[in-house]
Every structure is written in C-alpha cells, then in structure tokens.
C-alpha cells in the first residue's frame, strides 16, 4: 500500500511511503483484537472497590430477639444482610483485574487493527516536524490544513517531541503518542491515524521483531 507524504500545510511533498503488507495488509484476527482491547480496559481498572460485609459493619452483636415463639424467622444479629444497614453479602473486594497476553498475540492484534484502518483508508503520512515551543494554535492550524478538525485523530511520532505533545493535549479528540506506545485500543479509537514519515519504518521494525 502506497501513501503520499504530506507537508504540514496538507500539500503533497512528491514523496510516498510504502506500507509493509505483512503489517498493514494482513487478514485481521478479530479475536486477537478483542483480547487485547479487553486487557487494555482491564489494566485501566483501579480495583479499589470495597463493601462492608457482616463482620465489618459497626453494630452490636447482641441477639435482637429470642430464637423461638415470635412467629417470624430466626435473627441472630442486626448485622445480617437481611436488615437495613446490615453488612452486604458477597460484596466486592479490592482485586487486580490485570491478566497476561502473549507478545505475539498482542502484535497480531495491532497488525489486525492497522490492517482494518488501511482498508478503510484512514492512514495518513506527514513529513517530520517539531515546534520551537508549545503552540496550541499552531497545532490547530495543522489539523485544519489536513481537514481533520472535529475528527478523532491519532498522531504517531518517531520519538518524544514534547512541544508537539504539549501543543495538542488541550485539544478535544486529539491524541499524540510515540510509535512504541501505539496499542490496539488507540488504533481502533481513532478515526484518522497520522504517521510522521520516519515513524512508519520504526513501527514496522518494532512489529517485525519476533517474526
């Protein structure tokens, strides 16, 4: 797949980038994508939820009525989950939701997501650039030139460019990451993925390491 390299102003530079078919043109594996996105969401969970159970509620343990002769059910303590204010039965406890996935499966998931985006023609390439200082207006102008205003956009950098990141972070629907931070969720969550020119080769090298 060949894509034209654009300048910051959205004009063609006359250069093209050839996307590797082994990464951007495979038959997508939906189950791998599902597992990787599931892991991503699981890793975001704090797991700090907690409800007080019967042994933790601060009430008297005195037997509230006699065992027999009342015509009602037995009741041993006001802490019972059956009573208002009692402890919760089988309440949530703090836990870790993270789980392991093999590296090759995660690679397959990213390749599958990129292949979907390639089929949708949602990939763009721009020449490498940087800013001398953080300028949000400058980044907004960049999005306007590429006709990406009000579009969920993911810009993939070849390396850390703090001024580009800082220029973008207050803009809604915009995300800026380096090539090695790219994950399946970020790929699928974006309507358009914009690669800096040198980030393409670095990403292809990263995703081809275990082959």
Image (cartoon, grey):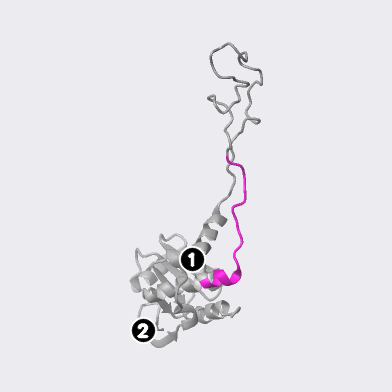
**Is residue 67 visible from the viewing direction of this image?**
yes
Q: Does the magenta stretch include residue 16?
A: no
**Is residue 134 visible from the viewing direction of this image?**
no
Label placed on residue 45: none
Image spot of residue 187 (x, y percent): 46, 68
Describe the element under mark 2 as helix, strand or loop: strand
- Quarter in which the C terminus is drawn: bottom right
41 vs 143, left or right, is right
Foreground pick, 135 / 196 = 196
Vertical relation: 87 (above or below) 206: above
Vertical relation: 60 (above or below) 20: above
User: Badge 1: how crowded within 10 Å, few (<14), some, or many (20+)?
Assistant: few
The alpha-carbon separation of the residues under discs 2 and 1 comes to 37 Å
Earlier in the chain: of badge 2 and badge 1, it is 2
Q: Which residue is drawn at 38% across and 67% down?
A: 191
Label placed on residue 31: 1
The answer to whether mark 2 and mark 1 are in CB contact below 8 A is no
Q: Which of marks 2 and 1 is in front?
A: 1
Residue at the far top in the pictured view: 69
- Quarter in which the N terminus is drawn: bottom left
Q: State the residue position of label 2.
A: 12
Q: Main secondary structure of the magenta part?
A: loop
Magenta range: 92-108
Describe the element under mark 1 as helix, strand or loop: helix
Image spot of residue 124 (x, y percent): 40, 76
30 vs 181, left or right, is left
């Amino acid at each position: 797949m060949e894509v034209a390299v654009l300048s910051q102003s959205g004009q063609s530079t006359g250069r093209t980038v050839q996307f590797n078919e082994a990464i951007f043109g495979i038959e997508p594996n939906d189950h791998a994508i599902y597992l990787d996105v599931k892991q991503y969401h699981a890793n975001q969970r704090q797991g700090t939820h907690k409800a007080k159970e019967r042994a933790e509620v601060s009430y008297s343990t005195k037997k509230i009525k006699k065992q027999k002769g009342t015509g009602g059910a037995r009741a041993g303590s006001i802490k019972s989950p059956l009573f208002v204010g009692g402890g919760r039965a089988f309440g949530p406890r703090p836990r870790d939701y993270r789980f392991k996935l093999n590296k090759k499966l995660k690679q397959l998931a990213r390749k599958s997501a990129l292949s979907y985006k390639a089929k949708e023609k949602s990939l763009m390439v721009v020449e490498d650039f940087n800013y001398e200082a953080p300028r949000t207006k400058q980044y907004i102008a960049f999005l306007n030139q590429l006709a990406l205003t009000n579009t969920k956009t993911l810009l993939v950098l070849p390396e850390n460019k703090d001024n580009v990141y800082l220029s973008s972070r207050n803009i809604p629907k915009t995300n800026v990451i380096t090539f090695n931070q790219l994950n399946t969720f970020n790929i699928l969550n974006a309507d358009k993925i914009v690669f800096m020119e040198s980030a393409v080769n670095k990403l292809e090298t990263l995703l081809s390491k275990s082959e």
